[in-house]
Amino acid sequence: MAVLLIIIFIAGYILISFETYLKINKAAIALFTGILCWIVYIVSNNDIENIEPGLSESISEIAPVIFFLLSAMTIVELIDAHNGFDIITKKINQTSKRKLVWTITLVTFFLSPILDNLTTSIVMVLLLRKLVDNPKQRMVFIGMIIIAANAGGVWSPLGDVTTTMLWMGRQVTAENILLKLFLPSLACVIAPLIICTFKMHGHVRTPVQTISSNKRQFNIKHQYIVLISGLVILLSVPVLKMLTGLPPYMSILFGLGVLWIITEIIHIKKPDEEKNELTVANALSRIDSPSILFFLGLLLGVAALQAAGILQLTANWLDHTIANENIIVVLIGLLSSVVDNVPLVAAAQAMYGLDKFSTDHNFWLLLTYCCGTGGSILLIGSAAGVAAMGMEKLSFIWYLKKISFLAVIGFFSGIIIYFLQQLFIN
């Protein structure tokens, strides 16, 4: 039974990796794989009465993550529907390549912790299209956006799905994510940025039309209200967790309710045809629902492996074979450049419980960093990279030649800073 479960899970992974060629949505494969693992586990044990409580417990652990992601994505979509991000992007107008790469990279790094790395990468790629006319010139900038978006997502509980999972699983706290991972994440960006700067010369050519005329025109006051309200709500989630102990998914659902009321009030006098495009209902129809189901399928598959005892055996094998928790974490981080980091983190949470490594233990903090930034090493290693690849038709081979080395430099620079910080500050 254990061998069959492993084969099914690995086969699902392989099919997900070849989504582009198979033309089958990865969410469909992930759901099929996750449920099939549970079917095999239940049939093999032939004891549904004893297995069902474990399945219910797994669902209860997964549901808060799904609710959190669903609410956060809806809030971001509401801001976007009101062109709120234009307020930020219109402030960037440099044409010098060196100045622009620093501006774009740092804006991405500080925006990603609030919006999440995927949304930030999409917003910044769209901005680049307004600033750089030549698609080939945009490619290096986009490479830095991917590195910065993933690094920025590490030092905030909202910035990356895996960081959110570890935060909601109580492996890390919001304050220690910020205090102990900000400098390593910054080093992960600054090191490749410095190298990239020396390779850039001259100016970019700006498109004739830098502002899209197709976008709906909004009252600037309403744009500011929705943008500021949305950002404050997102930032208040970890604060409420620290002050009141309210679970993050409850805080974000409450925030969504608040923003929902705000948008209803500011559009109360508009006709229904115009107002419908700016409602939460419309935002829910625009969010990336397949990604939510993708996470659900993967997490269910990992839960089945955990219930079967496979993950614990794997943890024991790693402990005895490698016998160094730091090396194990770095290897997991490097593996996340090839394999999606969501199931890797979910597996680590299942293999190494809080009874082995307590909250904010070095293991969990380093895992947060490595799994968040390791995905930048290959174009397919992160949601930000995959999104950029789809939007700008980036080549896997080009990224491997031009950006992967920079990402590796950043990855290990952050690890060095992390241990130096542990040595001198702690």
Image (cartoon, rainbow, N blue to C red):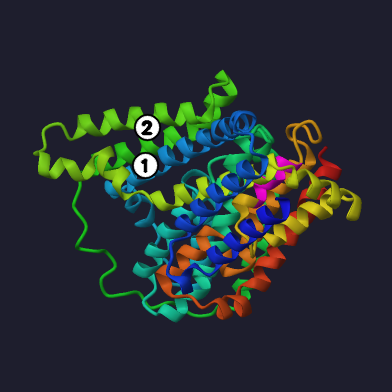
Magenta residues, start to end? 344-351
Q: Is residue 345 magenta?
A: yes
Q: Image quadrant of residue 399?
A: bottom right
Residue at 48%, 60% in the rendered image: 26
Marker disc for residue 256? 2
Residue 57 visible in this rendered orientation of the protein: yes
State the residue lying farthest toward the front.
46
Residue at 43%, 61% in the rendered image: 25
Residue at 55%, 46% in the rendered image: 161
Residue closest to the eye, 197 or 53: 53
- Residue 357: percent from the left, percent from the top? 79, 36
Q: Is residue 77 magenta?
A: no
Q: CA distance from mark 2 to mark 1?
A: 8 Å
Is 196 displayed left or right of 119 in the figure? right
Secondary structure of residue under mark 2? helix
Is 403 displayed left or right of 334 in the figure? left
Q: Earlier in the sequence, mark 2 or mark 1?
A: 1
- Residue 243: percent from the left, percent from the top? 57, 20
Residue closest to the eye, 51 or 55: 51
Q: Main secondary structure of the magenta part?
A: helix
Question: Label 2 neighbourhood size at 10 Å, few (<14), some (14-19), many (20+)?
Answer: many
Secondary structure of residue under mark 1? helix
State the residue lying farthest toward the top.
244
Residue at 56%, 25% in the rendered image: 241
Question: Looking at the image, do the residues carrying marks 2 and 1 touch, with CB atoms under 8 Å apart?
Answer: yes
> Type of residue at label 2?
Leu
Q: Which residue is mark 1?
A: 74
Question: Label 1 neighbourhood size at 10 Å, few (<14), some (14-19), many (20+)?
Answer: many
